[in-house]
Image: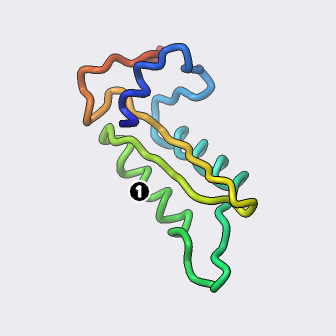
Amino acid sequence: MTGHWLLRQNQTAVERTWTRAVGAVTWLQSTYEANPPADRDDGGRAHIPLEQKIAYAMDALPRGVDVCWVHYTKSQSLISFSVVCCLNHHHPGLPCPLPPA
């Protein structure tokens, strides 16, 4: 469960800690754009459009719901990147490892 990542206090970093959803979504978008998803050989859709992913993240994150994006890249590597909320809707008892200042 992604909420348990809050227990990994030794893996926190100020540059990846945001107090507003827009900062986290900007990071998600830049990571996505640096590692775009692969297209299917048959021309079918292999992923939802970035705009829909952004809209979902902007809705979910302020409610304390984690966002995970996973896809295969053009080099066929699997990439997974997530934003874990604190306070977390599904794990309200877990403390924030790096509380906002």
10 Å crowding of disc 1: few (<14), some (14-19), many (20+): few
Residue lying at the far bottom of the rendered structure? 42
- Where's residue 42, x and y in %? 63, 85
Q: Dot 1: what SS?
A: helix
Q: Please tell me which residue is depicted at 62% across the width and 25% down the height of the picture.
A: 15
- Classify 27 as above or below 40: above
Of residues 71 and 22, the one nearer the viewer is: 71
- Where's residue 67, x and y in %? 43, 46
Residue type at tag 1: Tyr
Q: Judge from the rendering whether residue 81 lies leftward or rightward of residue 35; answer left or right.
A: left
- Classify 86 as above or below 2: above
Q: Judge from the rendering whether residue 76 lies leftward or rightward of residue 3; answer left or right.
A: right
Q: Please tell me which residue is depicted at 62% across the width and 59% down the height of the picture.
A: 72
Q: Residue beneath label 1, please?
A: 56
Q: Please tell me which residue is depicted at 51% across the width and 69% down the height of the picture.
A: 48
- Classify 92 as above or below 2: above
- Where's residue 91, x and y in %? 26, 29
Of residues 14 and 76, the one nearer the viewer is: 76
Q: Judge from the rendering whether residue 74 lies leftward or rightward of residue 54; answer left or right.
A: right
Of residues 65 and 101, the one nearer the viewer is: 65
Residue lying at the far right of the rendered structure? 75
- Where's residue 8, x and y in %? 47, 19
Quadrant for the N terminus, please.
Answer: top left
Q: Please tell me which residue is depicted at 30% across the width and 41% down the height of the picture.
A: 63
How many numbered tags mark residues here?
A: 1
Scheme of image coloration: rainbow
